[in-house]
Structure formats: C-alpha cells, structure tokens
Image: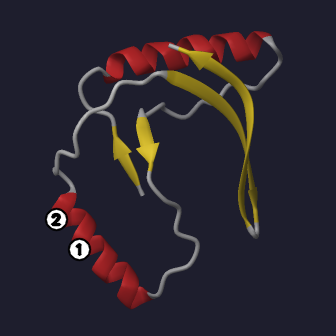
C-alpha cells in the first residue's frame, strides 16, 4: 500500500533521475520502470479473499483523500532484498537536504 506524491513530485522525479545516472556510472544496472514518487505505507504478504475485498473497498473510498504534506529533510538510498520471511532493507547512503 502506498501513497503517491502530489505537488512537487516533479522535483523528486528530477532528483531520482540524477541519482539513477550517478549509480549507473558506478556500475549499477538502470531500472527501466517508470519512477512514481510515493511513500510505502505497508506491504501485505498474505491476505484472504474476503479481507482483500474489504481492503479494496477501503482503498477505493480513500483513493482521493488528502493526507497532508511534509517536507523532506534527508534521503536514504536502500538496497532492498526480498526474502521469503520478509524484505530486508540495507541503508547504503544518507543525504541531508
């Protein structure tokens, strides 16, 4: 479940492009998927069909809900390793804004 960034997203997209270009120079493979600035709220590993239907109803009802705004103070670049027991996030670099 994630919340998409609203106003100001173009600045985040530009920054993500600069980070991608810099990491490619370091030998990392580019991610060819479209970047969508967002905040991940939770990951759902298992859900029953009944729970999924109820969850979908709630998400549809809140789809256009405004949840406020915040100012970013730092960015952390993580390595994400998806494992059976759950994701592992390893911080690689932090940058104050």
Element on which disc 2 rests: helix
Front in this rendered view, residue 34 or 2: 2
Which label belongs to residue 96?
A: none
The reply to whether the C-beta atoms of the residues labelled 2 and 1 are less than 8 Å apart is yes
Q: Position of residue 89 (x, y in %)?
A: 71, 46
Q: Position of residue 66 (x, y in %)?
A: 17, 45
At x 48%, y 32%, the residue is 34
The image quarter in which residue 29 lies: top right
Front in this rendered view, residue 49 or 66: 66
Q: Against 22, is 66 above or below?
A: below
The image quarter in which residue 69 lies: top left
Q: Residue under circle 1? A: 57
Q: Residue under circle 2? A: 61
Report whether 83 appears left or right of 61.
right
At x 77%, y 9%, the residue is 25
Q: Against 30, is 87 above or below?
A: below
């Amino acid at each position: 479940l994630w919340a998409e960034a609203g106003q100001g997203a173009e600045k985040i997209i530009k920054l993500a492009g600069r980070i991608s270009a810099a990491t490619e120079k370091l030998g990392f493979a580019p991610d060819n998927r479209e970047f969508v600035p967002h905040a991940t709220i939770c990951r759902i590993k298992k859900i029953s069909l009944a729970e999924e239907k109820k969850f979908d109803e709630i998400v549809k009802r809140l789809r256009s809900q405004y949840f406020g705004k915040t100012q970013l103070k730092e960015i952390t670049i993580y390595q994400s390793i998806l494992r059976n027991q759950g994701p592992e996030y390893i911080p690689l670099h932090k940058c104050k804004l």
